[in-house]
Amino acid sequence: MEVRDNRTPFWRDIQPAELAEHGIVLPPNQLASILLGNMPSHFHQKKNNMWESKQSGSLIRLQWQAERQMLTISDIQHGRVAKLLIQ
């Protein structure tokens, strides 16, 4: 994996631990499994259509809104949110 930002305009290698410091990280196979309705075992259902996991070290919350076809992924510790709209 590589990253760049406004301080370093050139691409540089980044390790998964450093990437996690920047925000929410879900491996592609895990996201695919979630979208197919197979929730990974480390996610525990908290409410209807809401799951949480602390496997990555910080609290990750998933919330599915069927009426909007939207998956909200929140990193509670870092205050970051990603929204995936499915059409």
Image: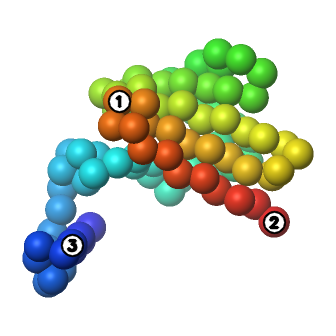
Q: CA distance from mark 2 to mark 3?
A: 30 Å
Residue type at mark 1? Gln
Residue 4 horizontal/vertical position (percent): 21, 74
Residue to which mark 1 is pinned: 77
Q: What residue is disc 3 on?
A: 5
Q: Tag on residue 87? A: 2
Q: Nearer the viewer, mark 2 or mark 3?
A: 3
Q: Secondary structure at mark 2?
A: loop
Rendering quarter of residue 57: top left
Q: Quote the CA–CA distance across marks 1 and 3.
A: 22 Å
Task: Say which residue appears at 59% left-offset and 19% top-offset.
Answer: 44
Give the left or right position of residue 7, taking residue 40 as reference: left
Camera-side residue: 22 or 19? Answer: 22
Q: Amino acid at mark 3?
A: Asp
Characterize the local packing of mark 3: few (<14), some (14-19) or many (20 or more) Cα atoms within 10 angstroms: few
Q: Nearer the viewer, residue 1 or 5?
A: 5
Q: Name the residue type under label 2.
A: Gln
Viewer-nearest residue: 27 or 73: 73
Q: Where 82 sits versus 38, above or below?
A: below
Image spot of residue 86 (x, y percent): 75, 60
> In the orientation shown, which residue stands out farthest toward the top?
46
Residue at point 15% right, 69% down? 13
* Crowd around label 2: few <14 · some 14–19 · many ≥20 (10 Å): few
